[in-house]
Amino acid sequence: MNKLILLALCWLMLGAALWADPSPPPVTPTFTPPIATPPTPASSPESSTTPESQKNPKNWVALEKPVAQMDSSWIVSTLKVSPDSKRVAFVAKAGNKWFVVVDGKEDKPYDSIVEGTLIFSPDSTRVAYTAKAGDKRFVVVNGNEDKPYDSIGEGTLIFSLDSKRVTYWAKAGNKYFVVVDGKEDKPYDGIGKGFPIFSPDGTRVAYGAQAGNKWFVVVDGKEDKPYDGIGAGTLIFSPDSKRVTYVGVAYVAKAPNKYFVVVDGKEDKPYDGIGDIVFSPDSKRVAYVAQAGNKWFVVVDGKEEKPYDTIVAAGGGKLLFDSSDSFHYLAVNGNSICLVEEMLTASAQTPDAKPSSPTPTPAVKR
């Protein structure tokens, strides 16, 4: 009996197993998207974007060269650096003697070195200054002493732009001389402030001189017409060094002084005042600011342009050439400041008209 029951249970378990689903229930898979990785390009000289400076890195190498040794003897305020920034010079003192040190090398000692006279030439190869020995003063250029004088004009020691020449004025007794490359010009009763000057090419020298109560300009040793005065800072050479202009002053008794612009020795019309004087870049034209009564205007090659209440000079205002045939300036008309631009244009011609010289035409901008 027991065997029959056990057999029946086995059959029931076998049937349940046969009817059951042999596969597991479906499972929805979880999807994880792949992360895109950009392809690595093949390396080649043509496709490389590395800057050249990173391909071949370079470093700055500093080469130090001692120029001068400083100690407690040197006067800091006298330090001068050459225009090319490669040389130095300064004044030093040892005991009761003074001397100039150039690139660490001491010049001859003197009783004193005149303050503010130490200079380099424009090309940085030459050094000059004024020294004092006893009661005499003299110029020293690259260690070579010029003739001694009673005094040397303050601020007059200069090199030419090409660095080849040196000039200054000196005093001996009651007479004044302009000295050029160690040679004295004619003695005068006085030399004007800001003189002498070199022409741009260094071949010419000009200055204002006094004889008695008259003043005149001396160019290359030749005296111009005498005047009661020469306008300070008005003596200039043209860019090509061939022309000279300045302001001559005529003192008029019981009346305002009159001022003349003198160009190549020839006087322009007298005016109550003179402002800027400028040459054109090609040196062919001269323009300046002039005053007549209460009006100011520009004069170009002797021809007066439109008058204004004033021509602006304050704050750095200037009369400037933009080219050989055009210039500009600022002027005041009433309450307006105008930019005035003038240029040369040919005058209108008629069949019977004679040719005329071009004249400046103002273009006024407010």
Image: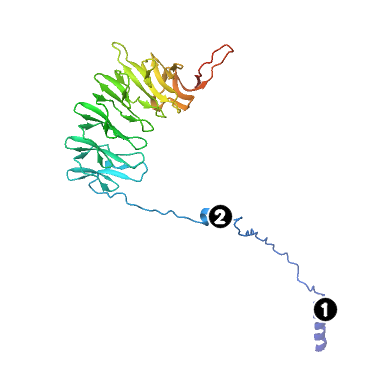
Q: Which residue is rendered at x = 51% and y = 56% of the image?
A: 56
- The three-letter amino acid code for the residue at tag 1 is Gly
312 horizontally vs 2: left or right: left
Neighbourhood count class around disc 2 (C-alpha, 10 Å): few under 14, some 14–19, many 20 upward: few
Q: Are marks 2 and 1 in contact (CB under 8 Å)?
A: no
Q: Position of residue 51 (x, y in %)?
A: 54, 53
Residue nearest the observer in this picture, 171 or 310:
171
Which residue has dot 1 on it? 15
Q: Position of residue 352 (x, y in %)?
A: 57, 11
Q: Which residue is rendered at x = 29% and y = 18% of the image?
A: 228
Q: Which residue is rendered at x = 27% and y = 19% of the image?
A: 214
Q: Secondary structure at mark 1?
A: helix
> Based on the displayed image, in which of its 4 quarters is residue 155 positioned?
top left
Q: Nearer the viewer, mark 2 or mark 1?
A: 2
Query: Coloring scheme of the render?
Result: rainbow
77 horizontally vs 335: left or right: left
Which residue has dot 2 on it? 50
Q: Position of residue 222 (x, y in %)?
A: 32, 24
186 horizontally vs 84: left or right: left
Neighbourhood count class around disc 1 (C-alpha, 10 Å): few under 14, some 14–19, many 20 upward: few
> Based on the displayed image, in which of its 4 quarters is residue 180 positioned?
top left
Residue nearest the observer in this picture, 327 or 31:
327
For the N terminus, the image quarter is bottom right
Q: Position of residue 27 (x, y in %)?
A: 73, 66
Q: How many labels sit on residues?
A: 2
- The three-letter amino acid code for the residue at tag 2 is Thr
Instruction: Please report whichever mark, 2 or 1, sits nearer to the chain's N-terminal start.
Output: 1
Q: Secondary structure at mark 2?
A: loop
In 3D space, how far apart are the residues under numbered discs 2 and 1 (Cα atoms)?
77 Å
Q: Which label was assigned to residue 127? A: none
